[in-house]
């Protein structure tokens, strides 16, 4: 049967991954991300070059079209002048001759004014109607162009061509600025817009004057910056001319527009890349966190086994002693053994209760009974009960109740457990002869409980993790400090349920200070 893996299977797989495997996975993912970014950069670079090449072609094509328009202006100007001022030679008053230079008096009188010869003649036809043949005549007209008219048209064309050449030679001798017969800027704007280029531009016309190239027409502020691309095309081009003329154009905002055009697809690509990198980093953090959590849980299971095994073993041993008939069962011995069984049973019950309590917290089923309680009274009672334990270890517990308004809304049992947990940690992580200070004070709208010890302290890298479930500060041996790593997690949860906050300060080798803030009743 095919089994589909679920997310829990994936997390379990991560938990059993070796550190080497995780490092290899991280390196492979990093290489993949770098390769993806490299491919995107290469694609963007090629796209930018292709776009620039296409833009150069379009602008150059538009400039050539404007150059053709300048030539068209001159040609059109010639035809306007020729139609206005040219007077053709007078024609003969009589009909046109059939042949070139023929005498008009001897020409055919039938030549029309159009110079064409019209010939009409009769033609016999035969029709077959009902099996009978009939004969008739029809008239056909043939129009023959006159050779004289063709000759005149060719002569007129050659004459016009000669006049055009003479006109162009005359124009070529003029200055280039005098040859421009229209608005160049307007034509440039039209041609560029037809090519979908709407950028502002500057233009000029340069010509060779006395062996030097200079601007002879165009924008007076034509000054392209260094690195700005100029586009040019030859105008009024004549192979016999020794005066090359060029039309120049540049776009002041071209670079900004190119960056804007590229950013239209670079920005989404960048956002997607950042998202992928973020997912990669987040996934790596989850993997490392799950790996670390797995190690913490393994330590918790090992420690819990040790913690539960000790009282069970003690109870089992005491039970065997009671069952052994070879021993003297005096009242004092039975009382001692039963006391040991009772104490170890309570200890075992308390440890199981802690685990069950955190399970209830995780499911969100905790229920607090809020009442008005005196925090000074709770701290005083907890300190008095705990002082016996500290004194047994030849230590000291100092109490200072300075809060003038110690009244808060809270659950008395859980608040007491919070104080006991912090006192217990202070004693466990102290050296020989523990020294603990507990105090209360008011600050603004808070009543603060402070518990300070002068023990081994907590390093900075461990300080941010002490409130996590199952986490225990490493002290060399897993079992040299008793507990499940649930105490501080429980403390933080209770404080937050009371709308309070907890802060911790610690220095390795000098001790730790916890400060709990509870909102006071005004």
Image: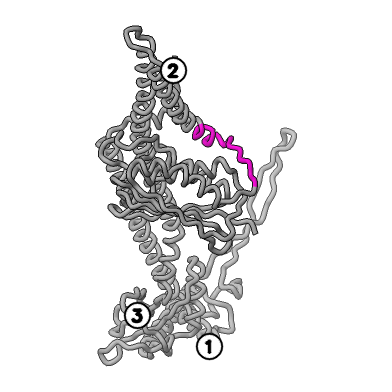
- Residue 357 position in % (x across, y down): 51, 33
Q: What's the CA distance linking mark 3 and mark 1?
A: 54 Å
Asked if disc 1 and disc 2 are in contact, CB closer than 8 Å, the reply is: no
Residue 391: quadrant of the picture: top left
Q: What's the CA distance linking mark 1 and mark 2?
A: 103 Å
227 above or below 58?
below
Residue toward you, 367 or 49: 367
Q: Secondary structure at mark 2?
A: loop
Q: Which mark is residue 225?
A: 3
Q: Is residue 363 magenta?
A: yes
* Residue under the image location 35 percent in, 54 percent down: 506
Q: Is residue 184 magenta?
A: no
- Residue 311 position in % (x across, y down): 38, 24
- List the residue tagged with mark 2: 2
Q: Earlier in the sequence, mark 3 or mark 1?
A: 1
Disc 1 residue crowd, few under 14, some 14–19, many 20+, Cα 10 Å: few
Residue 316 visible from this viewpoint: yes
- Residue 261 position in % (x across, y down): 44, 63
Q: Secondary structure at mark 1?
A: loop
Q: Which mark is residue 87?
A: 1
State which region is magenta: 357-371
């Amino acid at each position: 049967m095919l089994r589909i893996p679920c997310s829990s299977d994936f997390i379990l797989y991560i938990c059993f991954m070796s550190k080497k495997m995780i490092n290899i996975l991280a390196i492979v993912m990093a290489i993949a991300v770098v390769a993806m970014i490299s491919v995107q950069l290469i694609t963007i670079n090629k796209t930018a070059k292709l776009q620039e090449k296409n833009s150069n072609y379009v602008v150059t094509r538009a400039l050539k079209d404007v150059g053709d328009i300048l030539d068209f202006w001159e040609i059109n100007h010639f035809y306007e002048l020729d139609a206005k001022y040219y007077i053709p030679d007078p024609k003969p008053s009589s009909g046109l001759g059939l042949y070139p230079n023929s005498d008009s008096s001897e020409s055919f009188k039938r030549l029309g004014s159009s110079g064409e010869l019209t010939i009409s003649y009769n033609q016999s036809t035969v029709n077959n109607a009902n099996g009978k043949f009939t004969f008739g005549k029809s008239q056909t007209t043939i129009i023959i162009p006159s050779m004289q008219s063709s000759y005149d048209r060719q002569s007129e064309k050659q004459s016009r061509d000669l006049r055009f050449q003479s006109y162009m030679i005359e124009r070529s001798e003029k200055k280039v600025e005098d040859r421009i017969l229209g608005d160049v800027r307007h034509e440039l704007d039209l041609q560029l817009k037809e090519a979908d280029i709407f950028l502002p531009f500057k233009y000029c016309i340069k010509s060779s004057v006395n062996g030097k190239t200079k601007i002879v027409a165009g924008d007076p502020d034509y000054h392209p910056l260094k690195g700005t691309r100029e586009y040019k095309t030859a105008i009024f081009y004549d192979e016999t001319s020794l005066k090359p003329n060029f039309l120049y154009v540049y776009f002041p905002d071209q670079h900004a527009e190119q960056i804007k055009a590229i950013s239209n697809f670079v920005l989404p690509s960048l956002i997607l890349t950042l998202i992928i990198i973020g997912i990669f980093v987040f996934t790596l953090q989850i993997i490392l966190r799950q790996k670390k959590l797995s190690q913490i849980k393994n330590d918790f299971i090992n420690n819990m086994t040790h913690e539960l095994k000790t009282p069970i073993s003690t109870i089992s041993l005491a039970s065997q002693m009671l069952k052994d008939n070879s021993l003297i069962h005096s009242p004092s011995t039975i009382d001692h053994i039963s006391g040991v069984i009772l104490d170890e049973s309570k200890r075992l019950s308390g440890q199981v209760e802690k685990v069950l309590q955190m399970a209830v917290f995780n499911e969100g089923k905790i229920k607090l009974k809020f009442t008005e309680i005196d925090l000074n009274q709770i701290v005083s009672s907890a300190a008095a009960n705990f002082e016996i334990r500290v004194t047994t270890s030849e230590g000291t517990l100092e109490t200072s109740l300075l809060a003038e308004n110690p009244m808060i809304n809270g659950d008395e049992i859980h608040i007491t457990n919070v104080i006991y947990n912090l006192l217990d940690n202070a004693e466990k992580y102290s050296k020989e002869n523990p020294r603990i200070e507990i105090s209360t004070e008011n600050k603004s709208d808070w009543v603060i409980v402070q518990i300070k010890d002068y023990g081994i302290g907590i390093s900075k890298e461990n300080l941010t993790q002490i409130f996590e479930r199952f986490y225990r500060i490493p002290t060399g041996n897993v079992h040299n400090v008793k507990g499940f790593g649930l105490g501080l997690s429980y403390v933080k949860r209770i404080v937050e349920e009371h709308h309070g906050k907890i802060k911790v300060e610690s220095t390795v080798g000098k001790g730790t200070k916890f400060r709990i803030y509870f909102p006071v009743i005004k």
